[in-house]
Image: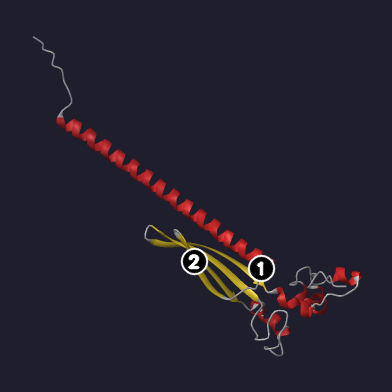
Amino acid sequence: MTSERKRGFTLIEVMAAVLVLGLLYTVLASAAMRGLRAEGTDRRRADAAMIADRELSALEAELASGAALEDGLVQHEQEPYIVRLDVEPVDVLAMLPRDLLKGVARPDPKAPSVLHDERGQSRVHRVSVVVAWDEAGEPDQVERITYAFDTSALSQYFPSEGNAGAGAASQDPFEQLRKEAPPELQQLIPGGKAPGKRR
């Protein structure tokens, strides 16, 4: 005598299946959250980079129109970012190799020149734009750095000449500087000749 019994899932099997599905959903949800968080971080970083590039472009446009560059730190808020613009003079001669620096040392550090004003301060400025924000409780930032040269004093060192023939040559403010510079420095001046090619 055979009796067919319909067999279903036991309570333990059902609980094991629920546990496996719960673990699977937890892993999938945490992976999705990590992806969303990374996407948000990348978007904020891209926005911060665009703000920094825009600030730098606006500053370069102001300088090209003849605006004076003021030293110091300027800060303003652009939610959720804090934008800091830091301008400070930098001595470009100090960046030269030591043996080359000896040949271009100024006899009077206070004497005004193309690279230094009458106070002895450099006319070359380091411009730093920092866009900072808070990323999940941790500070994060994007920085852009450039260098600007104060061209307001160039006219006294390179006066424009009256005749048309010399006017074309005086368009390049570095021409006279190239002529008078030692051969080692000529390659550092824009448009200068490389060593060994001097005529």
- Quarter of the picture holding the N terminus: top left
Amino acid at dot 2: His
**What residue is drawn where x is 91% and y is 69%?**
165
Please give the name of the residue rendered at 84% of the width and 72% of the height, measured from the top-left corner. Answer: 170
Query: Which residue is at the front of the view, 19 or 90?
Result: 90
Pointer 1: what residue? 63
* Mark 1 vs 2, N-terminal side: 1
- Taking depth in this image into account, of 61 and 52 the one nearest to the observer is 61
Q: Is residue 184 above or below residue 111?
A: above
Q: State the residue position of label 2.
A: 76
Q: Residues within 10 Å of mark 2 (few under 14, many from 20)?
A: few
Q: Give neighbour class at mark 1: few <14, some 14-19, many 20+ (Cα, 10 Å).
A: some
Residue nearest the observer in this picture, 56 or 35 = 56
Q: From the top left corner, tell me how far across and down residue 139 is, in percent.
A: 42, 63
Q: Estimate the spatial distance between the alpha carbons at disc 1 and disc 2, rounded to whole Å.
A: 20 Å
Q: Quadrant of residue 197?
A: bottom right
How many dots with numbers?
2
Side of 23 relative to 134 (left or right): left
Indicate which disc residue 22 carries: none
- Which residue is most to the top? 1
Secondary-structure class at tag 2: strand
Image quadrant where residue 53 sits: bottom right
Which residue shows up at 70% across the image and 90% down it?
108
Kindly identify the residue that appears in the image at 62 percent across and 61 percent down.
57
Where is residue 109 drawn, in percent x and y? 67, 88
Asked which secondary structure carries label 1, the reply is helix
Residue type at tag 1: Leu
How far across and down, in percent of the image, does residue 189 sit?
Answer: 75, 72
